[in-house]
Image: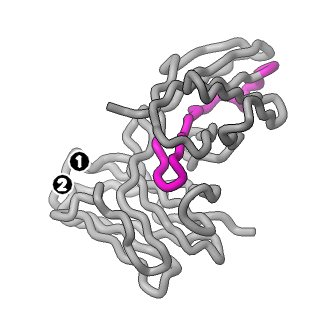
């Protein structure tokens, strides 16, 4: 069973709208949680990294939250742009091994 | 600073043929990873190198997959013979060291086995 579950599997939003992606994990012990953006045909690129003590971190229009008690994280995209169309992957590490979620595919339409 | 370089970007082969992928990590990065990513899935680790030593190859199908990292810099991943189920994107990543260090991914090699 995958230790990192993401939802929804995919979503379509209109340009300018906001959206939120979810990540639930069971990885233990917990070291940090990362959100990656993967454009089609490209490798993943890091958006945010959060440790146990951090509950929110922003990178431009991307804001990630972390609730280490409930083992949940979210990635919020504000005022979406066409270039936000990509797969967003949640990755949790125990400090040694990375566990990847299957990703959420976001499609932004004009 | 140059990122992780991979080649080829795309490869189409017939089943039972051999294939090799090449990766050049970011300069100074001691740790190198090979991942396989199936369509609609997250990457799965195949092998991790610390310098020239393979320290985690538990997920590498050793009957047909092999990898090497001579001199602890660039690396080659080989499949021989390829099977239809090997069709995937093969990603290479590197980091300064293992653990919490940021991993930087290459663009991947998309393999199609027909």
Judging by the rendered image, the residue that carries numbered circle 1 is: B114
- The total of numbered circles placed on residues is 2
A101 or A55: which is nearer to us? A55
| Residue B44 image position (x, y, % from top left) | 39, 47
Quarter assignment of residue B66: bottom left
Residue B52 shows up from this direction: yes
Residue at (49, 69) in percent of width and height = B23
Where does residue B46 sit, x and y in percent of width and height?
35, 57
Q: Which residue is mark 2?
A: B15
Q: Is residue A4 magenta?
A: no
Q: Position of residue A46 (x, y in %)?
A: 66, 46
Check the image and name the residue furthest to the bottom. B71
- Relative placement, left or right, of A91 versus B38 is right
Mark carried by residue B14? none
Quarter of the view holding residue A50: top right
Image quadrant containing the C terminus of chain A: top right
Residue B112 is left or right of residue B85, and the answer is: right
Q: Nearer the viewer, residue B27 or B51?
A: B51
- Residue at x 47% of width, y 39% of height: A28
Q: Is residue A47 visible?
A: no
Quarter of the picture containing the N terminus of chain A is top left
A64 in relation to B6, above or below:
above
Secondary structure state at the residue bearing disc 1: loop
Callouts 2 and 1 close, C-beta under 8 Å: yes
- What is the secondary structure assignment of the residue under circle 2? loop
Query: Residue at point 19% right, 52% down?
Result: B83
* Residue stretch rendered in magenta on the structure: A78-99
Left-right relation of B11 to A51: left
């Amino acid at each position: 069973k995958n230790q990192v579950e993401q939802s929804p599997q995919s979503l379509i939003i209109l340009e300018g709208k906001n959206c939120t992606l979810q990540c639930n994990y069971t990885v233990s012990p917990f070291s940090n949680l990362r959100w990656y953006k993967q454009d089609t045909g490209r490798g993943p690129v890091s958006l945010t990294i959060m440790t146990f003590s951090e509950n929110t971190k922003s990178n431009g229009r991307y804001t990630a939250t972390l609730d280490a008690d409930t083992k949940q994280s979210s990635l919020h995209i504000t005022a979406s742009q066409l270039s936000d169309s990509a797969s967003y992957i949640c990755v949790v590490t125990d400090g040694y091994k990375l566990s990847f979620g299957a990703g959420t595919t976001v499609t932004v339409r004009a | 600073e140059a990122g992780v370089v991979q080649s080829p970007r795309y490869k189409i082969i017939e089943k039972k043929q051999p294939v090799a992928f090449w990766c050049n990590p970011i300069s100074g990065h001691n740790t190198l990873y090979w991942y396989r990513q199936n369509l609609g899935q997250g990457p799965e680790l195949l092998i991790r190198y610390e310098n020239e030593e393979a320290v985690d190859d538990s997920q590498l199908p050793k009957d047909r997959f092999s990898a090497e990292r001579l001199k602890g810099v660039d690396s080659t991943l080989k499949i021989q013979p390829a099977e239809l189920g090997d069709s995937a994107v093969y990603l290479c990543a590197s980091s300064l060291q293992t653990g919490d260090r940021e991993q930087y991914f290459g663009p991947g090699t998309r393999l199609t086995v027909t």
